[in-house]
Image (cartoon, grey):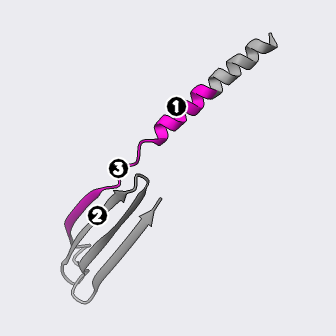
């Protein structure tokens, strides 16, 4: 009886580890390009705000990624913004 329990336990452990290893082979889809435009008019705060952005990310070496985003525009007549954002991960 104890041998059967041990065999079943070993078989289940091997199955779980095999499935986990197979799923670990799939890398997340980190490669993308994006861009957009937004006209901000929150109740006409000193006029309109025209904003645009461009960004992207690239995956490399199967499990690493790096990317960035650039945002440029204004929020009304007297407030402007320029934003750079970079990221990397494993």
State the residue position of label 1: 19
Q: Earlier in the sequence, mark 2 or mark 1?
A: 1
Marks 1 and 3, how far apart at CA = 20 Å
In the image, is residue 47 above or below residue 66?
below
Left or right, residue 63 beside residue 14: left
* Stretch in magenta: 14-38
Q: In front of the other: label 1 or label 3?
A: 1
Residue placed most toward the observer, 85 or 65: 65
Residue 33 location (% of width, % of height): 24, 60
Categorize mark 2 by other alpha carbons within 10 Å: few (<14), some (14-19), many (20+): some
- Which residue is painted at 70% across and 22% down in the image? 9
Q: Earlier in the sequence, mark 1 or mark 3?
A: 1
Q: Earlier in the sequence, mark 3 or mark 2?
A: 3
Quarter of the image that includes the N terminus = top right
Residue 11 location (% of width, % of height): 64, 21
Categorize mark 1 by other alpha carbons within 10 Å: few (<14), some (14-19), many (20+): few
Residue 42 location (% of width, % of height): 26, 73
Categorize mark 3 by other alpha carbons within 10 Å: few (<14), some (14-19), many (20+): few
Residue placed furthest toward the bottom = 78
Element class at badge 2 = strand
Element class at badge 3 = loop
State the residue position of label 2: 56
State the residue position of label 3: 29
Element class at badge 1 = helix
Residue placed most toward the observer, 46 or 89: 89
């Amino acid at each position: 009886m104890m041998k059967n329990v041990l065999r079943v336990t070993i078989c289940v452990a091997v199955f779980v580890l095999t499935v986990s290893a197979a799923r670990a082979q799939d890398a997340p889809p980190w490669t993308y390009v994006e861009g957009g435009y937004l006209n901000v008019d929150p109740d006409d705060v000193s006029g309109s705000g025209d904003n645009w952005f461009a960004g992207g990310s690239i995956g490399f070496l199967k499990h690493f990624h790096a990317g960035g985003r650039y945002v440029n525009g204004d929020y009304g007549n007297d407030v402007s913004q320029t934003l750079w954002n970079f990221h990397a991960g494993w």
